[in-house]
């Protein structure tokens, strides 16, 4: 059984930084995409950043230049370094892993990020 455990959320002032981590336990196919989504109150969940097994990344425009996604495939762990945080980054951040061959997907429980102005 695959479980994703996130950590690193919290309260930070605008302009500050946070680093989110997500560790996956259980058997996950090596070919996968690991990503971070976020959901603000009253809004739909959106993909913030993703990284595939080859290290290719993509970001939504609003976080480009401020957020960096990385992974340690040996540890099945994905990170999201968030710099220059803005109040509009406030949301619950969810980790996701999707296997490319099976299309199975897994979600973490979410971690709250709050940016005060």
Image: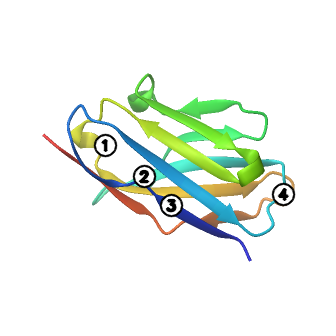
Q: Disc number at residue 36?
A: none
Q: Which residue is mark 1?
A: 89
Look at the numbered disc 3 and give the secondary structure of its residue. strand
Q: Position of residue 57 (x, y in %)?
A: 64, 31
Residue reaching furthest to the top:
65
Residue 46 visible in the snapshot: no
State yes or no: discs 2 and 1 in contact (Cβ < 8 Å). yes
Sooner in the amino-acid sequence: mark 4 or mark 3: 3
Spatial separation of the CA atoms under disc 1 and disc 3: 17 Å
Look at the numbered disc 4 and give the secondary structure of its residue. loop
Q: Which residue is mark 4?
A: 29
Spatial separation of the CA atoms under disc 2 and disc 3: 13 Å
Residue reaching furthest to the front:
75
Instruction: Give the quadrant of the N terminus.
Output: bottom right
Which of the two residues, 55 or 61, is positioned nearer the viewer here? 55
Residue at 67% x, 56% y: name it. 97
Look at the numbered disc 1 and give the secondary structure of its residue. helix
Q: Single out the mark in the foreground, 4 or 3.
A: 3
State yes or no: discs 1 and 3 in contact (Cβ < 8 Å). no
Q: Position of residue 36 (x, y in %)?
A: 53, 49
Spatial separation of the CA atoms under disc 2 and disc 1: 9 Å
State yes or no: discs 2 and 4 in contact (Cβ < 8 Å). no
Spatial separation of the CA atoms under disc 1 and disc 4: 31 Å
Sooner in the amino-acid sequence: mark 1 or mark 3: 3
Sooner in the amino-acid sequence: mark 2 or mark 3: 3
- Mark 2 neighbour density, 10 Å: few (under 14) some (14–19) many (20 or more): many
State yes or no: discs 2 and 3 in contact (Cβ < 8 Å). no
Above or below, 100 relative to 4: above
Q: Which residue is mark 2?
A: 38
Sooner in the amino-acid sequence: mark 1 or mark 4: 4
Residue at 59% x, 32% y: name it. 58
Above or below, 91 relative to 4: above
């Amino acid at each position: 059984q695959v479980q994703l455990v996130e950590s690193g959320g919290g309260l930070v002032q605008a302009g500050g930084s946070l680093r989110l981590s997500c560790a996956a336990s259980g058997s996950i196919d090596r070919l996968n995409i690991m990503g971070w989504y976020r959901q603000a109150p009253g809004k739909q969940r959106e993909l913030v950043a993703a990284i595939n097994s080859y290290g290719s990344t993509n970001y939504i425009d609003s976080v480009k230049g401020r957020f960096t996604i990385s992974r340690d495939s040996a540890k099945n762990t994905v990170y999201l370094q968030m710099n220059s945080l803005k109040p509009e980054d406030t949301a619950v951040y969810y980790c996701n892993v999707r296997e490319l061959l099976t299309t199975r997907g897994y979600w973490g429980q979410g971690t709250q990020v709050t940016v005060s102005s």
